[in-house]
Image: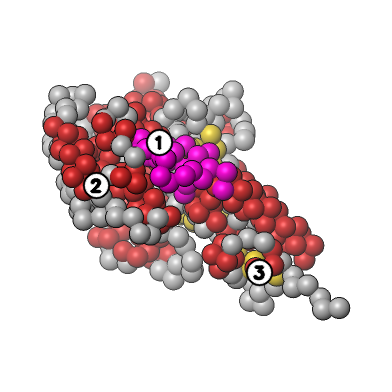
């Protein structure tokens, strides 16, 4: 009797001794899903299976493969249960499905590619639907009967609306976001209805002027670390994490002690707060769903050690004495105070906490560090290969870090001299 083909394979790589995973058609999943999971790293497993990402034995790898098959199978079943009769669904009913992970027709597809919706994306979709799509006469039409004239009439009505600040909707980023969201929903409907003529097919994407955040040049970055600017050890540690490691706000306060490699030294960015600005925030993967390494400068190392001496060591690196972590208002409020204390004139520049990443990128670009590796360092693309120019990046950041150390030491000596004079 012939042996049944195995539903998966988990070979061990000869170079790194880690395991790979391949799903075979005999696992019962669609061929498309099996192709997506051909010779993939276990590090690519969905967040729900994060505890299976580092199998050390063959048995553990097999268990992880079975867990993945079960997870993807469940996602497929949920997608099948959400199917509707195309002739009966209205524009509003179809588009609204994309505002929730549980009902979106794209959830299963994204899960198979390990690209789940981010909470922020879904929140934007919900806002677009509730504030600018729901209730429009376009939503009452049967989607199978909608024509280009209907789509154009909807876009015209949308552009004529006013935003909450009184400005016209047309030409705004919100207008562009709503139209792009509608295009995406209709394109997904056409994937399931090949012969149907998409009314948005010949409507181009609206163009908007992107908001360009400002950055601080090197001399202004250094002024932030001068005496009297940063009022506490927490402020020093957070400011160093922003400007010397390029971490996002949601990544800073999600950083755990086990992510700090003191010997390399480096920071492995594994976590970030989802919905960081809301009460519903929860821990998840960083933006892009990929881990990355960030520099761990001696200035930041010393600040963290001092912070732990003062507040104790807790679940998260940047914790207060009671174990809680500061929120977004802490960063915004302190960031404005830092700029004011440092005497930095903003002028027309839009300088916000996220500008720290732009400042670091500009600093590295000025020092002729490859843009490709700047993007990799900041997590703008997945990190597939070793950063062969990371030593250049570390050296540049180290130069700035040493200048910051000198400024901090100068401030300490000035305080001692003043104390001696006062005595």
Q: Residue at x 42, y 40 (%)?
A: 88
* 3 vs 2, front mark: 2
* Place of residue 167 in the rendered image (x, y in percent of width and height, measured from the top left): 14, 29
* Place of residue 20 in the rendered image (x, y in percent of width and height, measured from the top left): 65, 68
Do we see residue 25 in this rendering?
yes
* 1 vs 2, front mark: 2
Q: Which mark is residue 329?
A: none
- Which residue is denoted by mark 3 in the rendering? 24
Coloration mode: secondary structure
Q: Which quarter of the figure has residue 94? A: top left
Do we see residue 120 in this rendering?
no
Q: Which quadrant, please, contains the N terminus?
A: bottom right
Camera-side residue of 179 and 276: 179
- Helix, strand or loop at mark 3: loop
Is 105 in the magenta? yes
Camera-side residue of 413 and 67: 67
Q: Is residue 178 above or below residue 379?
A: above
Q: Which quarter of the figure has residue 391? A: bottom left
- Helix, strand or loop at mark 1: helix
Mark 3 and mark 2: span between their CA atoms? 42 Å
* Place of residue 178 in the rendered image (x, y in percent of width and height, measured from the top left): 27, 40
């Amino acid at each position: 009797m012939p042996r049944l083909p195995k539903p998966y394979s988990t070979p061990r790589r000869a170079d790194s001794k880690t395991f790979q995973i391949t799903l075979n058609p005999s696992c019962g999943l669609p061929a498309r899903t099996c192709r997506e999971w051909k010779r993939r790293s276990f590090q690519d497993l969905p967040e729900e299976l994060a505890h299976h990402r580092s199998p050390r034995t063959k048995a553990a790898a097999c268990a992880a493969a079975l867990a993945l098959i079960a997870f993807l199978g469940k996602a497929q079943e949920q997608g099948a249960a959400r199917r509707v009769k195309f002739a009966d669904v209205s524009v509003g009913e179809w588009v609204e499905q994309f505002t929730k992970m549980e009902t979106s027709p794209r959830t299963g597809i994204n899960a198979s590619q390990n690209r789940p919706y981010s909470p922020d994306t879904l929140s934007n979709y919900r806002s677009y639907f509730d504030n600018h799509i729901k209730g429009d006469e376009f939503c009452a039409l049967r989607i199978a009967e909608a024509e280009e004239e209907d789509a154009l009439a909807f876009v015209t009505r949308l552009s004529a609306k006013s935003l909450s600040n009184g400005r016209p909707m047309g030409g705004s980023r919100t207008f562009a976001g709503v139209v792009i969201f509608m295009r995406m929903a209709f394109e997904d409907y056409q994937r399931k209805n090949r012969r149907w003529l998409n009314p948005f097919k010949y409507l181009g994407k609206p163009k908007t002027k992107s908001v360009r955040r400002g950055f601080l040049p090197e001399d202004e970055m250094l002024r932030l670390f001068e005496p009297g600017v940063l009022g506490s050890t927490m402020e020093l540690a957070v400011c160093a994490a922003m400007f010397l490691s390029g971490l996002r706000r949601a990544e800073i306060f999600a950083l755990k002690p086990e992510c700090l490699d003191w010997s390399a030294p480096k920071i492995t960015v594994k976590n970030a707060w989802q919905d960081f600005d809301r009460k519903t925030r929860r821990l998840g993967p960083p933006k892009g769903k990929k881990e990355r390494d960030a520099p761990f400068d001696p200035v930041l190392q010393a600040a963290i050690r001092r912070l732990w001496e003062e507040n104790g060591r807790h679940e998260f690196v940047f914790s207060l004495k009671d174990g809680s972590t500061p929120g977004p208002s802490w960063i915004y409020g302190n960031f404005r105070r830092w700029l004011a204390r440092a005497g930095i004139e903003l002028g027309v520049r839009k300088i916000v906490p996220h500008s720290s990443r732009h400042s670091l990128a500009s600093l590295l670009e000025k020092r002729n560090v490859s843009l490709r590796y700047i993007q990799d360092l900041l997590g703008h693309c997945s990190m597939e290969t070793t950063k062969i120019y990371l030593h250049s990046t570390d050296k540049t950041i180290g130069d700035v870090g040493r200048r910051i150390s000198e400024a901090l030491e100068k401030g300490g000596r000035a305080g001692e001299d003043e104390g001696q004079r006062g005595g």
